Image (spheres, rainbow, N blue to C red):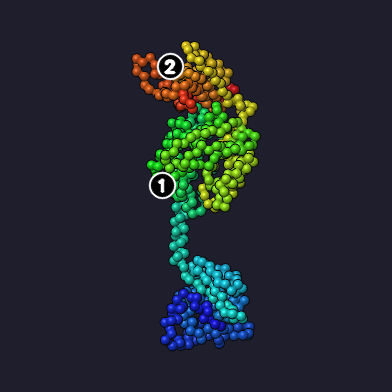
Amino acid sequence: MNFTRWSARLPGTQRRAAARTEQTAPPDRRGEGSVPAARAERLTDGDRPLPAVDELGVRGVLDRVPCLVALVHGPDHRIAYLNDAYTAAFGLRPVGAPARGALPELDELGLLPLLDQVLRSGKPRTVKSRKAPDGRSYTFTCTPAGEGDGRGVLVFATDVTDHAEAAERLRASERRQRETAVTLQRSLLPQELEEPDDLRVAATYHPGGTEAAVGGDWYDVITLGGGRTALVIGDVMGRGVRAAAVMGQLRTAVRAYARLDLPPHEVLQLLDGLAMEIDANQIATCVYAIHDPNDGRLVYASAGHLPILVRDENGTVRRADEPTGPPLGTGGWMHASGSVPLGPGSTAVLYTDGLVERRDEDLDEGIASLERALAGATGGPQVVCDRLVRSAGVTPEHDDDVAVLVLQHPARSGPDSELFRNAALELLGGVEAAPRARAFASGVLTSWRFPAELHDLGVLATSELVANSLQHGTPPMRLRLRRTDRRLIIEVTDGDDHLPRRRRADPGDESGRGIAIVATIASAWGSRRTPGGGKAVWCEFLLPKTADVGV
């Protein structure tokens, strides 16, 4: 067999061959026990002799190569040669024996099919970092050798144990880093969603499945008081602990800004400035929305985020228009608020790009697929949430974070609808406005069959809020009473945008005690500016158990 052709491929062979040009051939090593004399051996079945190798100068090179070298011959891969390193690693093997029985280590490593493939195709193949029975890791290169009936395969194995162990340590470190990021991410997300009176909400978060792929996706539900609810979803660009930490700071800031009861676009303006202070190189997308059951609309603003999807009571899905600005952290942009109807029976979905973005398709195609999935997803918000995630093909190996927030404004009927009522009165001003407001509130609360104590507190709070509006506000003025299954809400609006504040009145003062009285007797109170100018001042009382309140 002519070994010149394939021996030149071994690393260092040409260099060592040049160094031997002036040396004599090495003495015959037959009998030293390293490699049996192949020319003196015959196959066990008594057929033709195996090709001789110890007469060639390349044998001296192969015997001293620190890598493992084996030469197998024929369709059943009979052993023709093993170098010293191979026998030191796996022990002596009988020359002429088929590899399947005589080289069990290759069988365990799954290399026998590869030998068949190399012999059949005549092309070399390599498998990287396979752990052998001796506990070491090797990279195997199988190269065709010889021609015609003398065809064989040269197996060349390089010990890469150190590299494999280093790679495993790196992977373990990355796994620990990812676990830390996932733990941090989940701890910063709301452990339990707040439950608004008028909405049903559900959310889910799926971390990316690739190494250290957890990012900065977040969501939140914030009850603002007065029956209103803020909903937010966002995505910090980047991966790992840093993105999760930035996400936590932004989420905390959103909750603080939400307590100011500002319009959505003003909340995003504040977040934009904060994002630049946290990290000038870190940006995030975000949608902040407010639901007011009295208006039946979802008012929102977007900072470079994906559009909200809304399915109405008839099953028609629409994308919210996009009065959108650039992502948070870019600065220098005025955001704007928009609105979309969210009446009884409607479902809205807020989501991050991991749900719809795929490498092999356009982003609009992913959003269109989500629209189709939403159109056919019925049931409660958690059921809808799970169905949307499944329809998008999100698995534990998904390559990006996914956050989804689903909210439903249920269409109530029957006894359930009796627990949600509204009553309103236009206040025309004048000395008769306050008595009319008290009489109206007393009649409404009586018809709602509230207990006497709650009835009296409600009338007192109505009187103080109306008196405050008459003294400090301007027309138009309006009184609104609203009950849910959990609370009574009293709200007075007027045309002046000066917000009241609670203060301590001096003993000699004849006014200034109204808001203090309301804050004392109510469960909560607050104020906000209304679109187009003016303000709304509200308070609420927690209701006793339903069994104690008539309907």
Query: What's under tag 2, amino acid-wise?
Result: Gln
Give the quarter of the figure containing the C terminus.
Answer: top right
Left or right of residue 78: residue 532: left
| Residue 357 pos. (x, y %) | 55, 48
Q: For mark 2, what is the residue? A: 471
Residue at 58% over, 35% down: 408
**In the rendered view, would you say 549 is above or below 247?**
above
Query: What's under tag 1, amino acid-wise?
Result: Asn
Camera-side residue: 534 or 180?
534
Left or right of residue 372: residue 219: left
Camera-side residue: 130 or 151?
151
Residue at 48% over, 75% down: 10
The local secondary structure at tag 2 comes to: helix
**Disc 2 or 1, which lies upstream in sequence?**
1
Give the quarter of the figure containing the N terminus.
Answer: bottom right
**In the rendered view, would you say 515 is above or below 300?**
above
Q: For mark 1, what is the residue? A: 281
**In the rendered view, would you say 311 is above or below 175?**
above
Residue 257 is drawn in which quadrant?
top left
Residue at 49% over, 82% down: 59
The local secondary structure at tag 1 comes to: loop
Please identify, in this view, whether the residue under mark 2 or under mark 1 is nearer the observer.
1
The answer to whether residue 100 shows anywhere in this view is no
The answer to whether residue 177 shows anywhere in this view is yes
| Residue 527 pos. (x, y %) | 45, 26
Q: Which mark is residue 253?
A: none
Count of picture labels: 2
Residue 254 is drawn in which quadrant?
top left
| Residue 439 pos. (x, y %) | 52, 14
Q: CA distance from mark 2 to mark 1?
A: 50 Å
